[in-house]
Amino acid sequence: MDTVTGDAARVARVNGPLVEVTGLAGVAMDDIVELGPDRLPGEAVAIRGDVVTVQAYEYTGGLAPGHPARARREPLSARLGPHLLGGVFDGLLRPLAGAPAWLEPGRQEAAARGQEFDFAPSVADGASVTAGTCLGTVATASGIGYRVLVPPALSGVVAQIRPAGRVSADATIATVAGTPVGLTSAWPVRRPRPFRERKDASLPLITGQRAIDVLFPVTRGGTTAVPGGFGTGKTVLLQQITKWCDADVIVYVGCGERGNELADMLGELAELSDPRTGGRLAERTVVIANTSNMPMMAREASIYSAATVAEHFRDMGLDAVVIADSTSRWAEALREFASRSGELPAEEGYPASLASALAAFYERAGRVLTIEGREGSVTIVGAVSPAGGDMTEPVTTYTQRFVRCLWSLDRDLAYARHYPALSWSGSFSRDDDVIAAWHARHGDPGWAERRHRLATLLAEADRLSSLAELMGVSALPPAERVTILAGRLIREALLQQSALSATDAFCDTARAAALARAVLATADRCLDLARKGVPAATIEDQDFSPVLRAREEAATPDAVASRERVMLASLDELDREGTAA
Protein backbone atom coordinates (compact mmCIF):
# COMPACT_ATOMS: atom_id res chain seq x y z
CA MET A 1 0.00 0.00 0.00
CA ASP A 2 1.45 3.38 -1.00
CA THR A 3 1.87 5.94 1.76
CA VAL A 4 3.11 9.49 1.84
CA THR A 5 5.49 9.97 4.72
CA GLY A 6 8.17 12.39 5.76
CA ASP A 7 9.72 14.01 8.76
CA ALA A 8 7.57 17.12 8.18
CA ALA A 9 4.25 15.24 8.48
CA ARG A 10 3.32 15.63 12.13
CA VAL A 11 0.25 15.84 14.32
CA ALA A 12 -0.24 19.48 15.34
CA ARG A 13 -3.44 19.37 17.40
CA VAL A 14 -5.81 16.75 18.83
CA ASN A 15 -9.41 17.62 19.69
CA GLY A 16 -11.17 14.35 20.43
CA PRO A 17 -11.64 12.56 17.09
CA LEU A 18 -10.57 15.71 15.19
CA VAL A 19 -6.83 15.88 14.47
CA GLU A 20 -4.87 18.58 12.64
CA VAL A 21 -1.77 17.51 10.72
CA THR A 22 0.90 19.73 9.17
CA GLY A 23 3.50 19.01 6.51
CA LEU A 24 1.52 16.22 4.85
CA ALA A 25 2.13 16.51 1.11
CA GLY A 26 0.15 14.74 -1.60
CA VAL A 27 -3.04 14.24 0.41
CA ALA A 28 -6.49 14.82 -1.10
CA MET A 29 -9.93 15.21 0.40
CA ASP A 30 -11.41 11.96 1.77
CA ASP A 31 -8.00 10.23 1.76
CA ILE A 32 -7.18 7.91 4.62
CA VAL A 33 -4.48 9.26 6.94
CA GLU A 34 -2.68 7.10 9.50
CA LEU A 35 -1.96 8.91 12.75
CA GLY A 36 0.74 8.34 15.33
CA PRO A 37 2.91 5.29 16.02
CA ASP A 38 -0.20 3.07 16.22
CA ARG A 39 -1.26 4.22 12.72
CA LEU A 40 -4.81 5.12 13.79
CA PRO A 41 -7.00 5.45 10.67
CA GLY A 42 -8.63 8.79 9.91
CA GLU A 43 -10.11 10.64 6.96
CA ALA A 44 -9.03 13.99 5.54
CA VAL A 45 -12.07 16.26 5.80
CA ALA A 46 -10.52 19.70 5.27
CA ILE A 47 -7.35 21.08 3.72
CA ARG A 48 -6.33 24.66 4.48
CA GLY A 49 -2.89 25.45 3.15
CA ASP A 50 -0.39 23.27 5.01
CA VAL A 51 -2.95 22.11 7.61
CA VAL A 52 -4.94 18.93 6.97
CA THR A 53 -7.91 18.26 9.26
CA VAL A 54 -8.47 14.55 9.86
CA GLN A 55 -11.40 12.83 11.56
CA ALA A 56 -10.09 9.77 13.41
CA TYR A 57 -12.07 6.55 13.37
CA GLU A 58 -10.59 5.18 16.57
CA TYR A 59 -10.01 6.37 20.12
CA THR A 60 -7.29 9.04 20.07
CA GLY A 61 -6.16 8.66 23.67
CA GLY A 62 -2.35 8.78 23.73
CA LEU A 63 -2.10 10.60 20.40
CA ALA A 64 -0.14 13.82 20.88
CA PRO A 65 1.30 16.75 18.89
CA GLY A 66 4.55 15.76 17.25
CA HIS A 67 3.52 12.21 16.41
CA PRO A 68 4.07 11.19 12.77
CA ALA A 69 1.31 11.00 10.16
CA ARG A 70 1.04 9.15 6.85
CA ALA A 71 -1.39 9.35 3.93
CA ARG A 72 -2.52 6.21 2.11
CA ARG A 73 -3.58 8.02 -1.09
CA GLU A 74 -6.91 6.21 -1.12
CA PRO A 75 -10.39 7.00 0.26
CA LEU A 76 -12.11 5.04 2.99
CA SER A 77 -12.95 1.72 1.34
CA ALA A 78 -14.91 -1.37 2.34
CA ARG A 79 -13.41 -4.82 1.98
CA LEU A 80 -15.95 -6.86 0.01
CA GLY A 81 -16.02 -10.62 -0.33
CA PRO A 82 -17.82 -13.85 0.59
CA HIS A 83 -16.60 -13.51 4.19
CA LEU A 84 -19.25 -10.82 4.71
CA LEU A 85 -22.17 -13.25 4.81
CA GLY A 86 -22.83 -14.33 8.37
CA GLY A 87 -20.21 -11.95 9.77
CA VAL A 88 -20.29 -9.18 12.36
CA PHE A 89 -18.21 -6.07 11.62
CA ASP A 90 -17.54 -2.61 12.98
CA GLY A 91 -18.37 0.64 11.18
CA LEU A 92 -15.27 0.37 8.98
CA LEU A 93 -16.17 -3.21 8.05
CA ARG A 94 -13.43 -4.77 10.17
CA PRO A 95 -14.36 -8.16 11.66
CA LEU A 96 -15.46 -8.04 15.29
CA ALA A 97 -13.70 -11.28 16.16
CA GLY A 98 -11.39 -11.47 19.13
CA ALA A 99 -10.51 -8.03 20.49
CA PRO A 100 -12.41 -5.37 18.49
CA ALA A 101 -10.27 -2.96 16.49
CA TRP A 102 -11.57 0.02 18.43
CA LEU A 103 -10.16 -1.52 21.64
CA GLU A 104 -6.81 -2.19 19.98
CA PRO A 105 -5.76 1.13 18.38
CA GLY A 106 -3.85 0.68 15.18
CA ARG A 107 -5.17 -2.76 14.33
CA GLN A 108 -5.31 -2.91 10.54
CA GLU A 109 -8.31 -3.83 8.45
CA ALA A 110 -8.48 -7.49 7.58
CA ALA A 111 -10.67 -9.70 5.40
CA ALA A 112 -10.87 -12.68 7.68
CA ARG A 113 -7.50 -14.05 6.59
CA GLY A 114 -7.23 -17.79 6.91
CA GLN A 115 -10.78 -18.45 5.66
CA GLU A 116 -11.12 -20.67 2.62
CA PHE A 117 -13.97 -21.01 0.14
CA ASP A 118 -15.01 -23.44 -2.61
CA PHE A 119 -14.56 -21.70 -5.97
CA ALA A 120 -15.96 -22.85 -9.33
CA PRO A 121 -14.86 -20.94 -12.48
CA SER A 122 -17.44 -19.76 -15.01
CA VAL A 123 -15.06 -18.79 -17.84
CA ALA A 124 -11.94 -20.28 -19.36
CA ASP A 125 -8.55 -18.82 -20.14
CA GLY A 126 -8.67 -16.74 -23.30
CA ALA A 127 -12.30 -15.68 -22.90
CA SER A 128 -13.15 -12.03 -23.56
CA VAL A 129 -15.05 -10.44 -20.70
CA THR A 130 -16.47 -7.02 -19.87
CA ALA A 131 -17.23 -5.21 -16.62
CA GLY A 132 -19.66 -7.20 -14.49
CA THR A 133 -19.02 -10.57 -16.14
CA CYS A 134 -19.10 -13.46 -13.69
CA LEU A 135 -15.69 -15.15 -13.45
CA GLY A 136 -16.89 -17.83 -11.09
CA THR A 137 -19.01 -18.60 -8.05
CA VAL A 138 -18.27 -19.37 -4.44
CA ALA A 139 -20.46 -21.73 -2.43
CA THR A 140 -21.63 -20.22 0.86
CA ALA A 141 -23.41 -21.68 3.87
CA SER A 142 -26.38 -19.40 3.15
CA GLY A 143 -27.12 -21.14 -0.13
CA ILE A 144 -26.44 -17.90 -2.02
CA GLY A 145 -24.06 -18.40 -4.92
CA TYR A 146 -21.53 -15.62 -4.35
CA ARG A 147 -20.52 -14.35 -7.79
CA VAL A 148 -16.99 -13.07 -8.42
CA LEU A 149 -17.48 -10.28 -10.97
CA VAL A 150 -15.12 -8.37 -13.23
CA PRO A 151 -14.69 -4.96 -11.56
CA PRO A 152 -16.34 -1.87 -13.13
CA ALA A 153 -14.39 -0.22 -15.97
CA LEU A 154 -12.32 -3.36 -16.56
CA SER A 155 -12.58 -5.55 -19.65
CA GLY A 156 -10.31 -7.73 -21.76
CA VAL A 157 -9.03 -11.28 -22.07
CA VAL A 158 -9.01 -13.68 -19.13
CA ALA A 159 -5.75 -15.34 -18.19
CA GLN A 160 -4.72 -17.64 -15.36
CA ILE A 161 -8.23 -18.42 -14.17
CA ARG A 162 -8.24 -20.44 -10.97
CA PRO A 163 -9.31 -24.06 -11.30
CA ALA A 164 -12.17 -25.37 -9.19
CA GLY A 165 -11.25 -25.97 -5.59
CA ARG A 166 -10.52 -24.33 -2.27
CA VAL A 167 -9.19 -20.78 -2.36
CA SER A 168 -8.23 -18.38 0.43
CA ALA A 169 -9.94 -15.06 1.04
CA ASP A 170 -6.97 -13.14 -0.35
CA ALA A 171 -6.48 -15.33 -3.45
CA THR A 172 -6.27 -13.94 -6.97
CA ILE A 173 -9.02 -15.55 -9.07
CA ALA A 174 -7.90 -14.50 -12.53
CA THR A 175 -6.04 -11.87 -14.51
CA VAL A 176 -8.13 -9.70 -16.85
CA ALA A 177 -6.24 -7.53 -19.35
CA GLY A 178 -3.17 -7.85 -17.15
CA THR A 179 -5.04 -6.74 -14.00
CA PRO A 180 -5.37 -9.28 -11.16
CA VAL A 181 -8.92 -9.85 -9.90
CA GLY A 182 -9.14 -11.19 -6.36
CA LEU A 183 -11.79 -13.05 -4.47
CA THR A 184 -12.10 -9.96 -2.29
CA SER A 185 -12.07 -6.38 -3.49
CA ALA A 186 -12.23 -2.86 -2.09
CA TRP A 187 -14.66 -0.08 -2.93
CA PRO A 188 -14.85 3.53 -1.62
CA VAL A 189 -17.84 3.58 0.73
CA ARG A 190 -18.96 7.11 -0.14
CA ARG A 191 -19.09 6.40 -3.89
CA PRO A 192 -22.22 4.59 -5.20
CA ARG A 193 -21.41 1.56 -7.30
CA PRO A 194 -22.31 1.93 -11.00
CA PHE A 195 -25.18 0.19 -12.79
CA ARG A 196 -26.59 0.15 -16.30
CA GLU A 197 -30.14 1.39 -15.79
CA ARG A 198 -32.53 2.31 -12.98
CA LYS A 199 -35.84 0.45 -13.27
CA ASP A 200 -39.27 1.29 -11.93
CA ALA A 201 -39.96 -0.06 -8.47
CA SER A 202 -42.97 -2.29 -9.12
CA LEU A 203 -42.36 -5.39 -6.97
CA PRO A 204 -43.32 -5.54 -3.29
CA LEU A 205 -40.93 -6.39 -0.51
CA ILE A 206 -42.89 -8.83 1.63
CA THR A 207 -42.00 -8.13 5.26
CA GLY A 208 -44.32 -10.63 6.92
CA GLN A 209 -45.77 -7.84 9.09
CA ARG A 210 -49.47 -7.35 8.31
CA ALA A 211 -49.71 -3.68 9.30
CA ILE A 212 -47.05 -2.99 6.68
CA ASP A 213 -47.92 -5.42 3.89
CA VAL A 214 -51.66 -4.69 4.06
CA LEU A 215 -51.71 -0.93 4.65
CA PHE A 216 -48.30 0.63 3.99
CA PRO A 217 -46.33 -1.64 1.63
CA VAL A 218 -42.82 -0.93 0.41
CA THR A 219 -41.34 -1.89 -2.94
CA ARG A 220 -38.07 -3.66 -3.61
CA GLY A 221 -35.67 -0.81 -4.17
CA GLY A 222 -37.85 1.54 -2.12
CA THR A 223 -37.05 3.70 0.89
CA THR A 224 -38.77 3.77 4.26
CA ALA A 225 -38.40 5.75 7.46
CA VAL A 226 -39.55 4.45 10.85
CA PRO A 227 -39.87 7.39 13.26
CA GLY A 228 -40.88 6.80 16.85
CA GLY A 229 -40.08 7.91 20.35
CA PHE A 230 -38.36 5.87 23.04
CA GLY A 231 -40.22 2.67 23.89
CA THR A 232 -42.42 2.56 20.78
CA GLY A 233 -40.81 -0.63 19.44
CA LYS A 234 -38.64 0.58 16.55
CA THR A 235 -35.84 -1.89 17.15
CA VAL A 236 -38.19 -4.86 17.56
CA LEU A 237 -40.04 -3.97 14.34
CA LEU A 238 -36.78 -3.63 12.41
CA GLN A 239 -35.52 -6.91 13.80
CA GLN A 240 -38.75 -8.59 12.71
CA ILE A 241 -38.23 -7.27 9.19
CA THR A 242 -34.63 -8.48 9.32
CA LYS A 243 -35.78 -11.97 10.26
CA TRP A 244 -38.76 -12.38 7.94
CA CYS A 245 -38.59 -10.16 4.83
CA ASP A 246 -38.11 -11.94 1.50
CA ALA A 247 -34.83 -10.27 0.51
CA ASP A 248 -31.81 -12.36 -0.44
CA VAL A 249 -29.32 -10.51 1.78
CA ILE A 250 -29.92 -8.40 4.90
CA VAL A 251 -27.44 -5.72 5.94
CA TYR A 252 -28.27 -4.68 9.50
CA VAL A 253 -26.36 -1.67 10.81
CA GLY A 254 -26.71 -0.91 14.51
CA CYS A 255 -25.73 2.74 14.34
CA GLY A 256 -25.25 4.12 17.85
CA GLU A 257 -27.75 1.73 19.45
CA ARG A 258 -27.30 -0.05 22.76
CA GLY A 259 -24.94 -2.99 22.72
CA ASN A 260 -27.25 -5.29 24.69
CA GLU A 261 -29.98 -4.89 22.04
CA LEU A 262 -27.59 -5.88 19.27
CA ALA A 263 -26.29 -8.79 21.32
CA ASP A 264 -29.86 -10.04 21.84
CA MET A 265 -30.58 -9.74 18.12
CA LEU A 266 -27.43 -11.66 17.21
CA GLY A 267 -28.41 -14.41 19.62
CA GLU A 268 -31.87 -14.68 18.08
CA LEU A 269 -30.48 -14.68 14.54
CA ALA A 270 -28.17 -17.54 15.43
CA GLU A 271 -31.14 -19.61 16.55
CA LEU A 272 -33.53 -18.80 13.68
CA SER A 273 -33.74 -21.22 10.78
CA ASP A 274 -33.84 -19.91 7.25
CA PRO A 275 -37.04 -21.04 5.48
CA ARG A 276 -35.15 -21.04 2.17
CA THR A 277 -32.26 -23.32 3.11
CA GLY A 278 -33.09 -24.78 6.49
CA GLY A 279 -29.79 -23.38 7.79
CA ARG A 280 -29.25 -20.38 10.03
CA LEU A 281 -30.81 -17.08 8.99
CA ALA A 282 -27.64 -15.35 10.16
CA GLU A 283 -25.76 -16.95 7.28
CA ARG A 284 -27.27 -14.51 4.78
CA THR A 285 -27.12 -11.52 7.10
CA VAL A 286 -24.32 -8.97 7.38
CA VAL A 287 -24.30 -7.18 10.74
CA ILE A 288 -22.46 -3.88 11.13
CA ALA A 289 -22.32 -3.22 14.86
CA ASN A 290 -21.31 0.32 15.68
CA THR A 291 -22.92 0.67 19.07
CA SER A 292 -23.11 3.71 21.32
CA ASN A 293 -19.92 2.81 23.19
CA MET A 294 -17.80 2.58 20.01
CA PRO A 295 -15.93 5.50 18.42
CA MET A 296 -18.33 8.21 17.32
CA MET A 297 -16.80 8.98 13.91
CA ALA A 298 -16.87 5.33 12.84
CA ARG A 299 -20.62 5.60 13.39
CA GLU A 300 -20.75 8.25 10.66
CA ALA A 301 -19.00 5.88 8.25
CA SER A 302 -21.09 2.81 9.16
CA ILE A 303 -24.10 3.98 7.15
CA TYR A 304 -22.02 4.26 3.99
CA SER A 305 -20.34 0.91 4.64
CA ALA A 306 -23.78 -0.72 4.85
CA ALA A 307 -24.93 0.87 1.57
CA THR A 308 -21.74 -0.29 -0.17
CA VAL A 309 -22.18 -3.88 1.03
CA ALA A 310 -25.80 -3.90 -0.17
CA GLU A 311 -24.80 -2.53 -3.59
CA HIS A 312 -22.11 -5.20 -3.83
CA PHE A 313 -24.69 -7.97 -3.50
CA ARG A 314 -27.14 -6.05 -5.72
CA ASP A 315 -24.55 -6.20 -8.50
CA MET A 316 -24.79 -10.01 -8.34
CA GLY A 317 -28.49 -9.79 -9.22
CA LEU A 318 -29.69 -10.16 -5.62
CA ASP A 319 -32.24 -8.21 -3.58
CA ALA A 320 -30.59 -6.59 -0.55
CA VAL A 321 -32.17 -4.70 2.34
CA VAL A 322 -30.33 -2.18 4.51
CA ILE A 323 -31.78 -1.84 8.03
CA ALA A 324 -30.33 1.31 9.63
CA ASP A 325 -31.02 1.61 13.36
CA SER A 326 -30.88 4.51 13.69
CA THR A 327 -30.18 7.42 11.35
CA SER A 328 -30.73 9.86 14.23
CA ARG A 329 -27.58 8.59 15.95
CA TRP A 330 -25.75 8.97 12.65
CA ALA A 331 -27.00 12.56 12.37
CA GLU A 332 -25.80 13.21 15.92
CA ALA A 333 -22.33 12.08 14.85
CA LEU A 334 -22.50 14.59 11.98
CA ARG A 335 -23.53 17.28 14.46
CA GLU A 336 -20.69 16.52 16.84
CA PHE A 337 -18.16 16.52 14.04
CA ALA A 338 -19.53 19.78 12.64
CA SER A 339 -19.26 21.47 16.04
CA ARG A 340 -15.65 20.33 16.44
CA SER A 341 -14.66 21.46 12.93
CA GLY A 342 -16.15 24.92 13.38
CA GLU A 343 -18.94 24.54 10.81
CA LEU A 344 -21.78 27.00 11.28
CA PRO A 345 -24.70 25.23 12.95
CA ALA A 346 -28.19 25.21 11.47
CA GLU A 347 -31.43 24.08 13.08
CA GLU A 348 -30.91 22.45 16.51
CA GLY A 349 -27.14 22.49 15.96
CA TYR A 350 -27.18 20.09 13.00
CA PRO A 351 -24.97 21.06 10.05
CA ALA A 352 -26.63 22.78 7.10
CA SER A 353 -25.59 19.80 4.96
CA LEU A 354 -27.80 17.37 6.93
CA ALA A 355 -30.62 17.35 4.36
CA SER A 356 -28.26 16.67 1.45
CA ALA A 357 -26.47 13.93 3.44
CA LEU A 358 -29.78 12.19 4.16
CA ALA A 359 -30.83 12.52 0.52
CA ALA A 360 -27.52 11.06 -0.69
CA PHE A 361 -27.95 8.06 1.61
CA TYR A 362 -31.52 7.24 0.58
CA GLU A 363 -30.70 7.80 -3.10
CA ARG A 364 -28.49 4.71 -2.97
CA ALA A 365 -31.64 2.60 -2.82
CA GLY A 366 -33.24 1.43 -6.05
CA ARG A 367 -34.10 -1.45 -8.33
CA VAL A 368 -31.58 -1.50 -11.16
CA LEU A 369 -30.28 -3.37 -14.17
CA THR A 370 -26.71 -4.22 -13.26
CA ILE A 371 -23.70 -3.79 -15.53
CA GLU A 372 -23.96 -7.50 -16.33
CA GLY A 373 -27.66 -7.14 -17.24
CA ARG A 374 -29.27 -8.75 -14.18
CA GLU A 375 -31.95 -7.20 -12.01
CA GLY A 376 -31.01 -6.38 -8.44
CA SER A 377 -32.25 -4.03 -5.76
CA VAL A 378 -31.28 -2.21 -2.59
CA THR A 379 -34.11 -1.32 -0.20
CA ILE A 380 -33.32 1.05 2.67
CA VAL A 381 -35.28 1.09 5.93
CA GLY A 382 -34.05 3.72 8.35
CA ALA A 383 -35.20 4.23 11.93
CA VAL A 384 -35.51 7.77 13.26
CA SER A 385 -35.36 8.43 17.01
CA PRO A 386 -36.66 11.98 17.59
CA ALA A 387 -35.73 13.38 20.97
CA GLY A 388 -38.79 13.45 23.20
CA GLY A 389 -40.93 12.03 20.38
CA ASP A 390 -40.87 15.40 18.60
CA MET A 391 -41.79 14.59 14.99
CA THR A 392 -40.97 18.15 13.88
CA GLU A 393 -37.26 17.92 14.66
CA PRO A 394 -34.86 18.23 11.67
CA VAL A 395 -33.89 14.57 11.08
CA THR A 396 -37.53 13.40 11.00
CA THR A 397 -38.67 16.35 8.89
CA TYR A 398 -35.90 16.03 6.31
CA THR A 399 -36.19 12.26 6.11
CA GLN A 400 -39.90 12.41 5.22
CA ARG A 401 -39.00 14.39 2.10
CA PHE A 402 -36.80 11.66 0.67
CA VAL A 403 -38.59 8.39 1.45
CA ARG A 404 -41.42 6.60 -0.32
CA CYS A 405 -42.93 5.12 2.85
CA LEU A 406 -43.33 6.32 6.42
CA TRP A 407 -44.06 3.84 9.20
CA SER A 408 -44.74 6.18 12.11
CA LEU A 409 -44.88 4.53 15.52
CA ASP A 410 -47.39 5.81 18.06
CA ARG A 411 -46.56 6.09 21.76
CA ASP A 412 -50.19 5.60 22.87
CA LEU A 413 -50.47 2.37 20.89
CA ALA A 414 -47.21 1.11 22.37
CA TYR A 415 -48.34 1.93 25.91
CA ALA A 416 -51.59 0.07 25.18
CA ARG A 417 -49.41 -2.94 24.20
CA HIS A 418 -50.54 -2.79 20.59
CA TYR A 419 -47.54 -4.06 18.61
CA PRO A 420 -46.34 -3.17 16.10
CA ALA A 421 -47.42 0.32 17.23
CA LEU A 422 -47.83 1.49 13.64
CA SER A 423 -49.97 4.62 13.41
CA TRP A 424 -52.49 4.24 10.58
CA SER A 425 -53.17 7.99 10.67
CA GLY A 426 -49.54 9.13 10.71
CA SER A 427 -48.09 6.69 8.17
CA PHE A 428 -48.17 6.61 4.38
CA SER A 429 -47.03 4.67 1.34
CA ARG A 430 -46.53 6.39 -1.99
CA ASP A 431 -46.22 3.05 -3.80
CA ASP A 432 -49.62 1.55 -2.97
CA ASP A 433 -50.81 1.90 -6.59
CA VAL A 434 -47.96 -0.15 -8.06
CA ILE A 435 -48.29 -2.72 -5.26
CA ALA A 436 -52.02 -3.02 -6.00
CA ALA A 437 -51.22 -3.63 -9.68
CA TRP A 438 -48.76 -6.37 -8.67
CA HIS A 439 -51.36 -8.09 -6.48
CA ALA A 440 -53.91 -7.87 -9.31
CA ARG A 441 -51.45 -9.59 -11.66
CA HIS A 442 -50.85 -12.32 -9.09
CA GLY A 443 -54.42 -13.37 -8.44
CA ASP A 444 -55.63 -10.88 -5.82
CA PRO A 445 -57.52 -8.09 -7.66
CA GLY A 446 -59.35 -7.09 -4.46
CA TRP A 447 -56.19 -5.98 -2.60
CA ALA A 448 -56.62 -2.26 -3.35
CA GLU A 449 -60.30 -2.23 -2.38
CA ARG A 450 -59.59 -4.08 0.89
CA ARG A 451 -56.84 -1.64 1.77
CA HIS A 452 -59.11 1.33 1.02
CA ARG A 453 -61.97 -0.07 3.14
CA LEU A 454 -59.66 -0.88 6.05
CA ALA A 455 -58.13 2.61 6.01
CA THR A 456 -61.59 4.22 5.73
CA LEU A 457 -63.02 2.22 8.63
CA LEU A 458 -60.00 2.98 10.83
CA ALA A 459 -60.23 6.71 10.11
CA GLU A 460 -63.98 6.79 10.73
CA ALA A 461 -63.61 4.77 13.94
CA ASP A 462 -60.98 7.22 15.20
CA ARG A 463 -63.28 10.16 14.46
CA LEU A 464 -66.24 8.57 16.19
CA SER A 465 -64.12 7.49 19.19
CA SER A 466 -63.22 11.13 19.75
CA LEU A 467 -66.93 12.02 19.72
CA ALA A 468 -67.71 9.14 22.10
CA GLU A 469 -65.16 10.47 24.58
CA LEU A 470 -67.03 13.79 24.63
CA MET A 471 -70.64 12.60 24.42
CA GLY A 472 -70.54 9.06 25.71
CA VAL A 473 -70.82 6.03 23.47
CA SER A 474 -74.49 5.54 24.30
CA ALA A 475 -75.31 8.87 22.65
CA LEU A 476 -74.14 7.62 19.24
CA PRO A 477 -76.49 5.96 16.71
CA PRO A 478 -76.17 2.15 16.45
CA ALA A 479 -74.36 2.23 13.08
CA GLU A 480 -71.72 4.58 14.47
CA ARG A 481 -71.25 2.45 17.59
CA VAL A 482 -70.73 -0.58 15.35
CA THR A 483 -68.23 1.39 13.27
CA ILE A 484 -66.17 1.91 16.44
CA LEU A 485 -66.47 -1.84 17.03
CA ALA A 486 -65.25 -2.49 13.47
CA GLY A 487 -62.18 -0.33 14.09
CA ARG A 488 -61.40 -2.36 17.22
CA LEU A 489 -61.75 -5.63 15.30
CA ILE A 490 -59.35 -4.39 12.60
CA ARG A 491 -56.80 -3.32 15.19
CA GLU A 492 -56.95 -6.45 17.34
CA ALA A 493 -57.63 -9.16 14.75
CA LEU A 494 -55.50 -7.86 11.88
CA LEU A 495 -52.99 -5.13 12.72
CA GLN A 496 -51.73 -6.49 16.01
CA GLN A 497 -49.02 -9.11 15.60
CA SER A 498 -46.97 -10.95 18.18
CA ALA A 499 -43.23 -11.24 17.57
CA LEU A 500 -43.12 -14.04 20.16
CA SER A 501 -45.79 -16.25 18.59
CA ALA A 502 -44.63 -19.17 16.45
CA THR A 503 -47.76 -18.78 14.30
CA ASP A 504 -48.06 -15.01 14.18
CA ALA A 505 -44.47 -13.76 14.02
CA PHE A 506 -44.61 -14.05 10.21
CA CYS A 507 -47.68 -13.70 8.00
CA ASP A 508 -47.55 -14.33 4.26
CA THR A 509 -49.70 -12.41 1.78
CA ALA A 510 -52.33 -15.15 1.39
CA ARG A 511 -52.94 -15.45 5.12
CA ALA A 512 -52.93 -11.66 5.56
CA ALA A 513 -55.56 -11.38 2.81
CA ALA A 514 -57.67 -14.10 4.47
CA LEU A 515 -57.54 -12.28 7.84
CA ALA A 516 -58.45 -8.97 6.19
CA ARG A 517 -61.41 -10.58 4.41
CA ALA A 518 -62.59 -12.21 7.65
CA VAL A 519 -62.45 -8.93 9.57
CA LEU A 520 -64.21 -6.95 6.83
CA ALA A 521 -66.91 -9.61 6.41
CA THR A 522 -67.53 -9.56 10.16
CA ALA A 523 -67.67 -5.75 10.22
CA ASP A 524 -70.04 -5.65 7.26
CA ARG A 525 -72.36 -8.20 8.89
CA CYS A 526 -72.38 -6.23 12.14
CA LEU A 527 -73.22 -2.99 10.29
CA ASP A 528 -76.00 -4.81 8.45
CA LEU A 529 -77.45 -6.02 11.77
CA ALA A 530 -77.35 -2.48 13.15
CA ARG A 531 -79.25 -1.19 10.12
CA LYS A 532 -81.87 -3.93 10.67
CA GLY A 533 -82.52 -2.66 14.16
CA VAL A 534 -80.51 -5.09 16.27
CA PRO A 535 -79.42 -3.11 19.36
CA ALA A 536 -75.80 -1.95 19.24
CA ALA A 537 -75.20 -3.26 22.78
CA THR A 538 -76.33 -6.73 21.69
CA ILE A 539 -73.87 -6.69 18.77
CA GLU A 540 -71.06 -5.41 20.99
CA ASP A 541 -71.68 -8.22 23.50
CA GLN A 542 -71.27 -10.86 20.80
CA ASP A 543 -68.32 -13.27 21.16
CA PHE A 544 -65.84 -12.28 18.44
CA SER A 545 -63.12 -14.69 19.55
CA PRO A 546 -63.27 -16.81 16.36
CA VAL A 547 -61.96 -13.79 14.44
CA LEU A 548 -59.87 -12.21 17.19
CA ARG A 549 -57.94 -15.42 17.86
CA ALA A 550 -57.51 -16.39 14.23
CA ARG A 551 -54.24 -14.50 13.85
CA GLU A 552 -52.57 -16.70 16.49
CA GLU A 553 -54.49 -19.93 16.12
CA ALA A 554 -55.27 -20.23 12.39
CA ALA A 555 -52.00 -20.95 10.60
CA THR A 556 -53.35 -21.19 7.03
CA PRO A 557 -55.77 -19.19 4.85
CA ASP A 558 -58.19 -22.13 4.89
CA ALA A 559 -58.16 -22.19 8.68
CA VAL A 560 -58.86 -18.45 8.73
CA ALA A 561 -61.74 -18.91 6.28
CA SER A 562 -63.17 -21.63 8.50
CA ARG A 563 -63.18 -19.26 11.49
CA GLU A 564 -64.78 -16.58 9.33
CA ARG A 565 -67.65 -18.96 8.55
CA VAL A 566 -68.08 -19.76 12.25
CA MET A 567 -68.20 -16.04 13.07
CA LEU A 568 -70.70 -15.23 10.34
CA ALA A 569 -72.90 -18.17 11.37
CA SER A 570 -72.96 -16.79 14.91
CA LEU A 571 -74.01 -13.37 13.61
CA ASP A 572 -76.66 -14.95 11.39
CA GLU A 573 -78.10 -16.60 14.50
CA LEU A 574 -78.19 -13.19 16.14
CA ASP A 575 -80.06 -11.88 13.09
CA ARG A 576 -82.64 -14.67 13.31
CA GLU A 577 -83.17 -14.04 17.02
CA GLY A 578 -83.69 -10.35 16.35
CA THR A 579 -86.16 -11.09 13.55
CA ALA A 580 -88.12 -13.56 15.72
CA ALA A 581 -88.31 -11.01 18.52
Image (tube, rainbow, N blue to C red):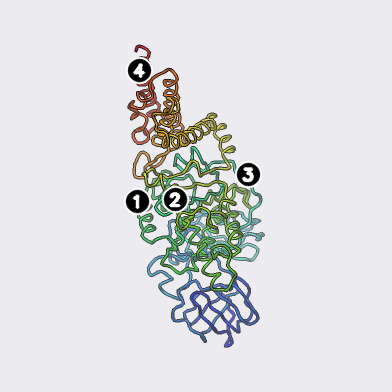
**Residue type highlighted by circle 1:** Glu
User: Cα distance, mark 4 to mark 3?
Assistant: 50 Å
Secondary structure at numbered mark 1:
helix
Q: Which residue is mark 2?
A: 238
Please say if the residues under marks 2 and 1 sit with CB atoms less than 8 Å apart: no
Instruction: Name the element at disc 4.
Output: helix
Q: Is residue 429 left or right of residue 94?
A: right
Sequence-first disc among 2 and 1? 2
Looking at the image, which residue is at 45% across and 37% down?
A: 466
Dot label at residue 200:
3
Identify the mark nearer the N-term, 2 or 3.
3
Where in the figure is residue 260, as x and y percent of width and height? Answer: 36, 60
Q: Eyeballing the image, is 501 above or below 550?
A: below
Query: How far apart in space, not on screen, are marks 2 and 4 (Cα)?
Result: 43 Å
Total marks shown come to: 4
The amino acid type found where label 3 is placed reads Asp
- Could you give the CA–CA distance between mark 1 and mark 4, rounded to whole angstroms? 47 Å
Q: Nearer the viewer, mark 3 or mark 1?
A: 3
Q: In the image, which disc is placed on residue 573?
A: 4
Q: Nearer the viewer, mark 2 or mark 3?
A: 2
> In the figure, 9 relative to 31: above or below?
below
- Find disc 1 in the rendering and name its residue: 271
Dividing the picture into quarters, in which one does residue 348 lie?
bottom right
* Mark 2 vs 4, N-terminal side: 2
Image quadrant occupied by the N terminus: bottom right
Q: What's the residue at 41%, 41% (across, down)?
A: 506
